[in-house]
Amino acid sequence: MKYFLIFFIFLGSINFLFAAEESSKKIELPDNFVSGDSERGSQLVESCSACHGTDGNSISSDWPKLAGQNQKYLYEQLQYFKDGVRMNALMMSVTPYLQTLDNEDLLDIAAFYSNYETSVGQAKNDEELLNVGTQLYRFGNMKKGIPACTSCHAVYGQGNSLAGFPAVAGQQIGYLTSTLKAYRSKERNTGELSEMMQSIAQNLSDDEIDALANYMHGLYQ
Ligand code: HEC
Ligand code: HEC
């Protein structure tokens, strides 16, 4: 213990201490990804449809659509909510329920929503907003340290299901805006994958976030 303390003092870095604490929150996710049983999943989502819709297409702009989202991403986020690593006032109402479910149940829920199709969104037809959104999404802004979103979320916003990078096409504007801001303030912080988005969101202004949210909402193939 003494040696550890000396080591920490020698290191003199508060960041390191934080990092150590963060990693203890991390949860184990399976390496080999198998598909869930959507039929079974359909019997586990009764308490979710009020907000996420019966087919995973939520009606409120502030509540995320789950329809068509890749299974790996949905499964991981459910684990985070279950373990309290990701927190949200509305999702808190189902956290006790999620805690009664095992990994297989969560995977089945993920499979259930993943099988539906995302409803198409309608971007605001504002030329300036669309220009900024298109430019940033497709090409990023090297000078500001913003990479192109296409490299991970794909040209049409379908994400990358193998890597578990989320689909963003057609996602609700209110939710896209609030979640990008939550990455920027580091409030959304579930480990390495969020850190990737945190460092990107760090460089986005409010106006750029609005433009990107509008663009992604209206994206479809
Ligand atoms: C009272 C409304 C409400 C209920 C009920 C609810 N959710 Fe949510 N859910 C939300 C909100 C709001 C968010 C966005 C949270 C945030 O901003 O971090 C969310 C986020 C999610 C996400 C992450 C989506 C993403 O794109 O990252 C998943 C997965 C999810 N909910 C699944 C469920 C499941 C499964 C149930 C039922 C067991 C459920 N939710 C019940 C409101 C709700
Ligand atoms: C290097 C890969 C990468 C790049 C580049 C990237 N993202 Fe992400 N993005 C991710 C990953 C991984 C996640 C999920 C992180 C997590 O688990 O919290 C994510 C999550 C998101 C989410 C949340 C989705 C949801 O359903 O909650 C949004 C919105 C988003 N990214 C938008 C963007 C935008 C806009 C850009 C470009 C400015 C961008 N991303 C660039 C990898 C990337």
Image: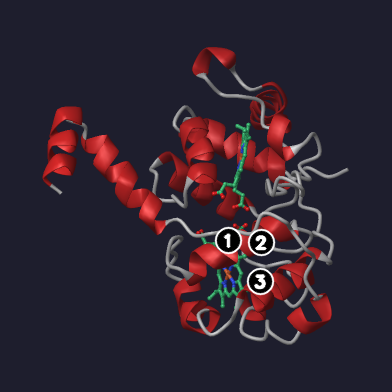
How far is the residue under mark 1 from the one under mark 2?
5 Å
Which residue type does callout 1 highlight? Gln
Task: Kindly report which numbered mark, 3 or 2, lies closer to the viewer in this rendering.
Answer: 2
Residue 147 percent across, percent down from the top left: 61, 24
Ligand 1 lies under 8 Å from the Cβ of mark 1: yes
Q: Residue at x 74, y 44 (%)?
A: 159
Residue identifier under label 1: 77
How far is the residue under mark 1 from the one under mark 3?
14 Å
* Residue 77 in which image quadrant: bottom right
Dot 2 lies on which element? helix
Work out whether residue 42 or residue 10 is closer to the camera in this orientation and state it. 10
Disc 1 + disc 2, Cβ < 8 Å: yes
Ligand 1 lies under 8 Å from the Cβ of mark 2: yes
In this rendering, would 92 be left or right of 155? left
**Label 2 neighbourhood size at 10 Å, few (<14), some (14-19), many (20+)?**
many
**Label 3 neighbourhood size at 10 Å, few (<14), some (14-19), many (20+)?**
many
Q: Which residue is drawn at 49% across and 35% down?
A: 201
Residue 106 percent across, percent down from the top left: 65, 73
Work out whether residue 95 or residue 156 is closer to the camera in this orientation and state it. 95
Q: Residue at x 73, y 44 (%)?
A: 123
Residue 119 percent across, percent down from the top left: 80, 59
Residue identifier under label 3: 52
In this rendering, would 86 be left or right of 14? right
Which residue type does callout 3 highlight? His
Q: Can residue 124 be seen in this view?
A: no
Residue identifier under label 2: 74
Residue 99 percent across, percent down from the top left: 50, 80
Ligand 1 lies under 8 Å from the Cβ of mark 3: yes
* Residue 24 in which image quadrant: bottom left
Is residue 43 shown above or below 87? below
